[in-house]
Image (tube, grey):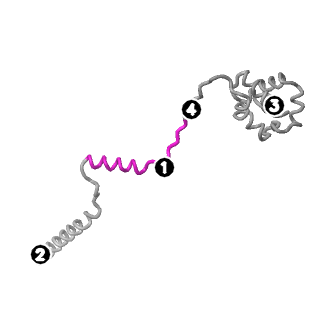
Amino acid sequence: MAEQHSSKSIMWVTIVVAAILIAIIYPLTANKTAGSAADNSKGADEADVRIQPVAKFELSKAEAPAASGPRDGATIYNTVCGACHNTGAAGAPKIDDKAAWAPRLATGKEALIKSVTNGKNAMPAKGGATLSDVEVKNAVEYVMSKAK
């Protein structure tokens, strides 16, 4: 009988030790935010806010300003032509290089307008922009006045 008594006491000691360990460990590992469904959704919203990116970037098409007529030569040169003619990119003659412009100016305004309209060498037609014939003429006249 002594064997039965000792195995019962070992069993009860094991159960008590297990219960004590569970009572100590469970509160340490239990989810503190566990609660009602409302509490859980609140936590999810807070998490979404915390993991938002620092910045957002969106591309959208810029609205063109209302056309009030053809733009003047200086505006067209500064927005379209100047990218190449200020730096000499792709072999474009610089606006202040009178020697490079002399043979071009000698051909006359109509020949220059035709070159700009149709494109020449690396320069695309109308400088790669959507220009009206009047705007091309204004740009050519502006460049002629600066290159003389």
Camera-side residue of 19 and 67 = 67
Q: Looking at the picture, does residue 51 appear above or below residue 94?
A: below
> Which mark is first along the chain, 2 or 3?
2
Cα–Cα gap, marks 2 and 1: 68 Å
Q: Secondary structure at mark 2?
A: helix
Quarter holding the N terminus is bottom left
Cα–Cα gap, marks 3 and 2: 117 Å
Task: Give the numbered dot on residue 145.
Answer: 3
For the stretch drawn in magenta, the main secondary structure is helix
Q: Which residue is mark 1?
A: 54
Cα–Cα gap, marks 1 and 4: 23 Å
Name the kind of residue labelled 4 in the image: Lys
What is the x, y in percent for residue 127? 74, 30
Q: Which residue is mark 2?
A: 5
Name the kind of residue labelled 3 in the image: Ser
Camera-side residue of 76 and 122 = 76
Q: Residue at x 76, y 24 (%)?
A: 137
What is the x, y in percent for residue 115? 81, 26
Label 3 vs label 1, nearer the camera: 3
